[in-house]
Image (cartoon, helix red, strand yellow):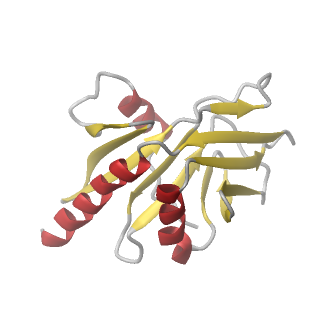
Amino acid sequence: MFKTALSATCLVALASTAVQAAGPTSLGQFGDWNAATYAKGDLARCFIMSKPSSKEPSNLRHGEVFFFVQTGDKDSNTESSFQTGYDFAQDSVVTVTIGDDSFRMLTEGSNAWLERLEREPALLAAMRAGSSMTLEARSLRGNVTTYQFSLAGVTAASRMLARCNTDATQS
């Protein structure tokens, strides 16, 4: 399973106004999406992230919830991930819906990754073309949860991923 996701702590640091020197460096805010870069060995990696605009059921504590896309290793141009403040039900999947497109994410603990890596380009294309993204999940306690993410600004933010991929291949 794909496990190159940033830690939730790192994402929270980016979302705050004071980014530490050793942590991610902001590349800007683009609508509802943030873009940032961080060092992984000798390479610069970039990612974009957003928080949901709504969380259901509203009476549950969801913790910190993020969706992000980062520059990938050689096998993939991007790596998408979803993180919550609770553990998912064992062997459950997260369903991502953008317009008529649907994608499945595998879960482990509080993280989820796209089930089929070859669908990464299609997911990012759907995000760029869409206006909202819905994620449905099931918690370890059996609660069905739904998250709405605005896709406003994702196209501009994702241009930062291309810039990082170019920088990484030229080093």
Describe residue 48's horizontal placement relative to residue 126 as left or right.
Answer: left
Which corner quadrant holds the C terminus?
A: bottom left
Front one among 120 and 63 = 120
Task: Tell me what residue is drawn at x 72 percent, y 25 percent.
Answer: 61
Front one among 155 and 145 = 155
Residue 76 in percent (x, y) is at: 41, 73
Which corner quadrant holds the N terminus?
A: bottom right
Task: Tell me what residue is drawn at x 48 percent, y 49 percent.
Answer: 68
From what the image shows, is residue 21 above or below residue 92?
A: above
Describe residue 50's horizontal placement relative to residue 141 as left or right.
Answer: left
From what the image shows, is residue 95 above or below residue 87?
A: below
Residue 162 in percent (x, y) is at: 28, 62
- Report the residue that reaches farthest toward the left: 171
Task: Tell me what residue is drawn at x 27 percent, y 47 percent.
Answer: 38
Residue 48 in percent (x, y) is at: 39, 47
Residue 21 in percent (x, y) is at: 20, 32
* Total numbered badges shown on the rendered structure: 0
Task: Tell me what residue is drawn at x 34 percent, y 75 percent.
Answer: 74
Describe residue 20's horizontal placement relative to residue 102 as left or right.
Answer: left
Describe residue 64's horizontal placement relative to residue 96 as left or right.
Answer: left
Image quadrant assignment for residue 141: top right
Image quadrant assignment for residue 93: bottom right
